[in-house]
Amino acid sequence: MEPLLAFLLSALSLSSLVFRLSWLSLRLLLSLRLLLSSLLLFVRLPSSLGGVSISLLRRRALLFRPV
């Protein structure tokens, strides 16, 4: 009876440890995803603004091209 009880207790503690680890990894993944999406947003905005300014400069260069 005692080995069975010890086995059950160790299995219970192991399952709670696995649950805690999975919960922590899930929270870490969610926070990492949030951080990555905000970083992508910050990277995407200046690049789109830069793309707009580059296209405007190209248009200006085409308009004011020396004949």
Image (cartoon, rainbow, N blue to C red):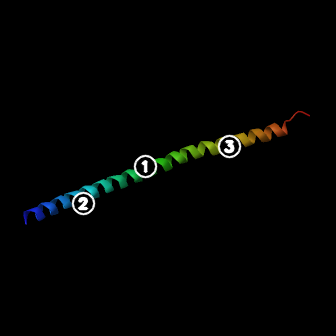
**Image location (x, y in percent) of residue 3:** 10, 62
**Which image quarter holds the C terminus?**
top right
Say which label, 3 or 1, has the lower sequence index.
1
Say which mark, if any, is on residue 32. Answer: 1
Within 10 Å of disc 2 (Cα), the crowding (few <14, some 14-19, many 20+) is: few
Residue type, label 1:
Leu
Choose the circle earlier in sequence order: 3 or 2.
Answer: 2
- Amino acid type at mark 3: Gly
51 lies above or below 21? above
Cα distance between the residues tagged 3 and 1: 28 Å
Few, some or many C-alpha atoms within 10 Å of disc 3 (few <14, some 14-19, many ≥20)? few
| Quadrant assignment for the N terminus | bottom left
Whether tag 3 and tag 2 are in contact, CB under 8 A, the answer is no
Residue at image x 20%, y 61%? 11
Residue 52: mark? none
Mark 1 neighbour class, 10 Å CA radius: few under 14, some 14 to 19, many 20 or more: few
Left or right for 20, reference 45? left
SS type, badge 3: helix
Kindly indicate whether the residue at mark 1 contacts the one at mark 3 (C-beta within 8 angstroms).
Answer: no
Between 1 and 65, the residue placed more toward the observer is 1
Residue 51, numbered label: 3
Choose between 21 and 1: the one closer to the eye.
1
**Label 1: element kind:** helix
Measured as percent of width and height from the top left, residue 32 is found at 43, 49
From this viewpoint, which residue is outermost toward the bottom?
A: 1
Above-or-below relation of 2 to 62: below
**What residue is shown with label 2?**
15
Indicate the secondary structure of the residue bearing disc 2: helix
Position of 66 compared to 2: left or right? right
Please give the name of the residue rendered at 45% of the width and 51% of the height, measured from the top-left corner. Answer: 34
Residue 33 placement (x, y as % from top left): 45, 51
Seen in the image, is 61 located left or right of residue 31? right
